[in-house]
Image (spheres, helix red, strand yellow):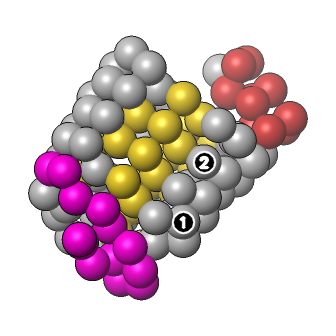
Amino acid sequence: MIIQHVNRVYNGCVIGVNADFGEGFVIMHPIGVVINSKVKGGINITLESGVVMGDEKGMSPSLGSHIFIGAGAKVFGPITVGDNVKVGANAVVVKDVESNKTALGIPAKTK
């Protein structure tokens, strides 16, 4: 709890106590990052500033491994994001993203 409070005050970053990520979880610039307690993720996940995952109703995504999420991106709902996925800056992901895809836009579409 103390670490959470210090993180929130100094970095403007909120990570729910039950959020679960594997090895290699990195927040490049923690300002404005919000992660719901029910978010689950694999290994080697990198987030940029302003990323928001999950919502206040507990509808949270499940993330695979080897994922990059760009600045300002939002990932909402009970969706699955596959392995080796890139989410572009400011994208809003509200549907499943298959492995080896890039999600861009509002709402995000995959390439």
Q: In the image, which disc is placed on residue 48? A: 2
Residue 74 location in percent, x, y? 47, 65
8 falls in the magenta region: no
Q: Residue at x 25, y 42 (%)?
A: 84
105 falls in the magenta region: yes
Indicate the quadrant where residue 66 lies. top left
Image height check: is 94 above or below 39?
below
The span shown in magenta is 99-111
Asked if residue 91 lies left or right of residue 21, the reply is right
Instruction: Give the alpha-carbon distance from disc 2 to disc 1, as whole Å.
Output: 9 Å
Q: Are marks 2 and 1 in contact (CB under 8 Å)?
A: yes
Q: Secondary structure at mark 2?
A: loop
Quadrant occupied by the N terminus: top right
Please state which of residues 51 and 6 is positioned toward the viewer in this rendering.
51
Counting other residues with Cα less than 10 Å from the Cα at mark 2, is it few (<14), some (14-19), or many (20 or more)?
many
Q: Residue at x 36, y 54 (%)?
A: 86
Please state which of residues 46 and 61 is positioned toward the viewer in this rendering.
46
Q: Which residue is mark 1?
A: 89
